[in-house]
Image (spheres, coloured by chain):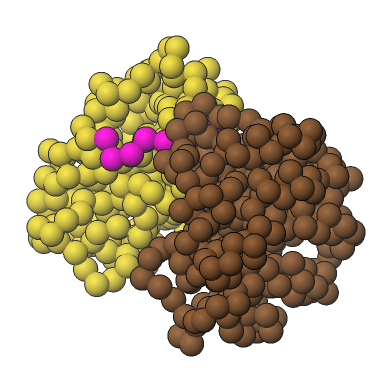
Chain colours: A brown, B yellow
């Protein structure tokens, strides 16, 4: 793993690293924040999956998470949102291809050889992070924003043995019923909608739920409210009788100004479950 | 004044605004954060002056200041660092021209008609902010980073009646003796070094000092340590017997990861003096 940069931040280290990914068949970049506590002992780890158009950089720079990770003593991992590079397929649209991996393993051309973000985020990268950084493998939480909120929820409900805690900021909550979802799941997984079902947080919530309380924040002034379908997730939580806080945050939109406003709540929520 | 964007953030509003500047003879963009307290009453205001290459956007996005401005109930203003636009002079170097106004009023060609950041930051913009936003004109503090730390210190010591409090992150502390300073002061103010003296924080500290304690943070791993000349400012503080905390922060560099790590201390420092 190659060190791209390391900066002291809140007494810990904010690093950016590059590695050759077997899952994505290209070089991948990620950001890892180690709190000061990690100098003395292994710490729990919170994954932050980012949204459409983002790289590892956006949340690392704008989510204001390091202050709270340092306070509560947990590491943060910010993966990229797709494979990248010259040999990797792409699309002119902002919401397909590079920057829009959707946390699935593509089965369709031209995406299949590289777009394996499910395997990357759930297997390759957790193994790498556990090997390279002082994190406790048994104490992992996962969160994310928008497409990354979809990723966090679908991954956590599918792999409950791996993740102790899950939360999301304005997640794409019902992708099988939204233009943010049908387009991408169709492109990456094909026309058979049965293959989409394991990647829909609202359907997973009804079918599987999660073994710990779930925290969701959704802004009422979100520019993409209709695409996110929070009502489907709310209905699913009710139907499942899932322990959850789904908070409608008055006046907040889809931006990082929204995310940073509630980041402390999320990091604290994970830290307490990961104790 | 034109609203470019407004986002809810920590219960307040992070706005970006554009206006025609008389001082700079061009359109100027600035960011203003109003904390939730400003919905009910006027609040004190803290100016954050940014460094070389920055716009209004960098600190607004990456300094993590809104959390603390909301907590302590003060407004933030992030001005741009120079005039901009097609008719405005520029230079290929990153440290001269657009993005590098140095908080002086240029007297030399080709800079003189537009590069009046001293007048802009100390007169035009304070008047505009006091007119357009619910801030208490008698309660103003000023801080900044690098070139903006130079600006904050030189402005506050020159206009002590205006500013109750001043602090700085890794300021250009002795520009008359540094390549970060001699180049720009020479270009904007001409070869006569007597004109540079009123813009050197270390010289001003010896001559004038400040009527309240001053807070300076400087990273020991700062990539630009030699250009910033913190030792000159430390010597000046000692010579003046200025009430001050000049803190050497171990391992921190010149980045926003450094700034955000100590932003709470600075906002709290200003808020307490502005009470």
Q: Residue at x 43, y 16 (%)?
A: B39
Foreground residue among B267 and A173: A173
| Residue extending farthest bottom | A87
Is B6 contained in the magenta span? yes
Residue B57, percent across and down?
38, 49
Determine if residue B200 is in view: no
Q: Residue at x 79, y 33 (%)?
A: A241
Instruction: Give the total number of marks visible in the rendering.
Output: 0
Is A178 contained in the magenta span? no
Foreground residue among B150 and B244: B150
Horizontal arrangement in the rendering, residue A33 relative to residue B77 (left or right): right
Residue A84, percent across and down?
51, 77
B89 relative to A127, above or below: above
| Residue extending farthest top | B40
Q: Quadrant of residue B121?
A: top left
Q: Residue at x 64, y 62 (%)?
A: A194
Horizontal arrangement in the rendering, residue B34 relative to residue A172 (left or right): left
Foreground residue among A269 and A121: A121
- Magenta stretch in the rendered image: B3-10
Horizontal arrangement in the rendering, residue B74 relative to residue B3 (left or right): right
Q: Residue at x 15, y 39 (%)?
A: B20
Horizontal arrangement in the rendering, residue B123 relative to residue B61 (left or right): left
């Amino acid at each position: 793993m190659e060190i791209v940069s390391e900066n002291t931040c809140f007494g810990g280290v904010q690093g950016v690293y590059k590695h050759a990914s077997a899952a994505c068949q290209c070089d991948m970049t990620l950001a890892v924040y180690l709190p000061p506590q990690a100098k003395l002992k292994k710490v729990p780890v919170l994954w932050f999956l980012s949204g459409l158009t983002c790289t590892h950089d956006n949340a690392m720079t704008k989510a204001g998470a390091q202050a709270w990770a340092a306070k509560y003593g947990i590491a943060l991992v910010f993966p990229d949102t797709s494979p990248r590079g010259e040999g990797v397929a792409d699309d002119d649209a902002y919401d397909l291809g590079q920057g829009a991996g959707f946390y699935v393993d593509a089965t369709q051309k031209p995406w299949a050889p590289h777009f394996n973000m499910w395997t990357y985020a759930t297997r390759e990268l957790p193994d790498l992070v556990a090997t390279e950084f002082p994190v406790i493998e048994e104490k992992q939480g996962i969160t994310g924003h928008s497409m990354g909120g979809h990723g966090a929820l679908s991954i956590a409900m599918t792999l409950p043995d791996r993740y102790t805690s899950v939360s999301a900021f304005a997640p794409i909550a019902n992708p099988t019923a939204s233009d943010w979802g049908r387009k991408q799941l169709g492109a990456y997984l094909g026309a058979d909608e049965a293959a989409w079902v394991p990647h829909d947080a609202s359907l997973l919530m009804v079918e599987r739920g999660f073994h710990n309380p779930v925290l969701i924040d959704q802004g009422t002034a979100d520019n993409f409210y209709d695409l996110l379908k929070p009502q489907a997730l709310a209905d699913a939580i009710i139907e499942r009788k899932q322990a959850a806080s789904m908070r409608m945050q008055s006046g907040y939109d889809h931006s990082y100004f929204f995310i940073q406003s509630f980041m402390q709540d999320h990091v604290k929520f994970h830290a307490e479950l990961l104790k």
